Amino acid sequence: MAKPRANFVCQSCGAVSSRWQGRCEACGGWNTIVEETGAAAGFGSPAARGGRGKPFALESLAGDARPAPRIATGIEEFDRVTGGGFVPGSVALLGGEPGIGKSTLLIQACAALANRGERVIYISGEEAAAQVRLRAERLGLAEAPVELAGATQVEDILATCATGRRPALIVIDSIQTMHTEAVDSAPGTVTQVRASAQALLRHAKLGGSTVILVGHVTKDGQVAGPRVVEHMVDAVLSFEGDSAHHFRMLRASKNRFGATGEIGVFEMTGSGLAEVPNPSALFLAGRDATAPGAAVLAGMEGQRPMLVEIQALVAPTSLGTPRRAVVGFDSNRLSMILAVLEAHGGLKLGMHDVYLNVAGGLRADEPAADLAAAAALVSSLTGAALPAERVYFGEIALSGAVRPVIHAGARLKEAGKLGFRRAVLPQAQQTTDEDKGAGVALTCCGHVAALVAEIAQSSAEAPAGRDGPRRAPPRGAAAD
């Protein structure tokens, strides 16, 4: 018998080389190449498998297209992210930092399905069955008929799931701990993760069960292991949160059976994760409406409108190079907004430190957040507090023009529901009669110079407060 050929596989990107080297030529990672025995992809060549392929029937595009059936868990925030529930035969990858609450969320979802008569199997490769059972007791879910086991052998898991009634949901926690006999390498390596995921995916497609794979994340927040696993699965979900806050967000970055970008908001409580049906009220709770440098953004997360507060602090610097610190906002986009305010708004920000923060730990990545960020920056520089019942949304171009954005109607309805009475939006924004009937007055803004002039004028007209007189408006702020 021929000696198995050794391959050197990068544990970050999955690239294969014929010899060991300190730096991967594909991704540039250092000390990520590990020797593995067997085929590079974890499977034998066509000649080794024997036989030739069999032809199969082809179909046309015309036909009866029916929507995929769904299995709803009853947890509305979870079902929203998955597109209305689990699709039988689909495979989802759930990633998140250690201790963020992935196992807690999955146990609650498993218990909800099991209590409705569905067969649910939970396979734990990291914790013993007793540890999972203790967590279920703390959550008050010990009586749920969830079938639990601690195993890491893929062949044994598939044989167990094939016995008895077809399970509706199979949870694998986590995919990095699984190993298959088809590959001669250590658990957690690229080849083992890829081969194990492929075997579980094949079982889901043939058997009709929904499989959820839990994945570890790296320091930069990406799911560990080869990116090919993300391409293999039908949905990629990330469970995000901050240890300083009680809420958690479930976000879909890929979904073949639903919209991407959807988020579900949960709050971590003593009895598990509780749904947050109105996240806008949560993110705006406790805000100081009288402080300068705070603007409310009417944003969108997927198909859900969400109101968040953008906070800015502009202070004179004693350093040769001003500092730019950003939390929850794109630093490159902040640099662009500052350049536009200087070039077209008449502001002098070159000798000021700038700090920008999205309150609550949420990320504001959409271009519609430009106008709210600019309003917060101008408010902090002039010392004028923005009106408390006003929201902002719009994209700022390099020319200083404010460009229209999508989903204006949903943003206005969410603002009116939370008691906001006026919205500052792009002048070219298309609105309907239904949007105007949301109870929110519209103020059109066509250029950043008009925004700066309005805030500077309110700063000049504002009376002196307890902290002394307001700052004088910047030179050129009122020029249009």
Image: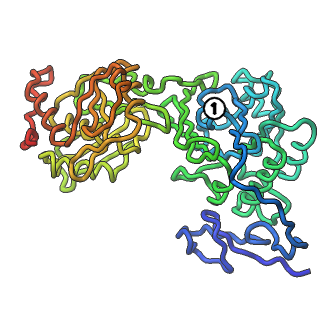
Residue at 12% x, 34% y is: 456
Query: Between residues 416 and 196, which one lies in front from this camera angle?
Result: 416
Horizontally, is 181 left or right of 400 in the view? Answer: right
Horizontally, is 106 left or right of 328 in the view? Answer: right
Residue at 8% x, 38% y is: 478
Horizontally, is 72 left or right of 168 in the view? Answer: left
* Image quadrant assignment for residue 476: top left
Is residue 351 in view? no
Residue at 17% x, 29% y is: 384
Q: Looking at the rendering, in which quadrant would you find the N terminus?
A: bottom right
Q: Identify which amino acid the numbered label 1 is placed on.
A: Asp
Rendered location of residue 270, percent (x, y): 61, 22
Q: Where is mark 1, residue-wise?
A: 79
Q: Looking at the rendering, in which quadrant would you find the C terminus?
A: top left
Is residue 342 in view? yes
Q: Secondary structure at mark 1?
A: helix
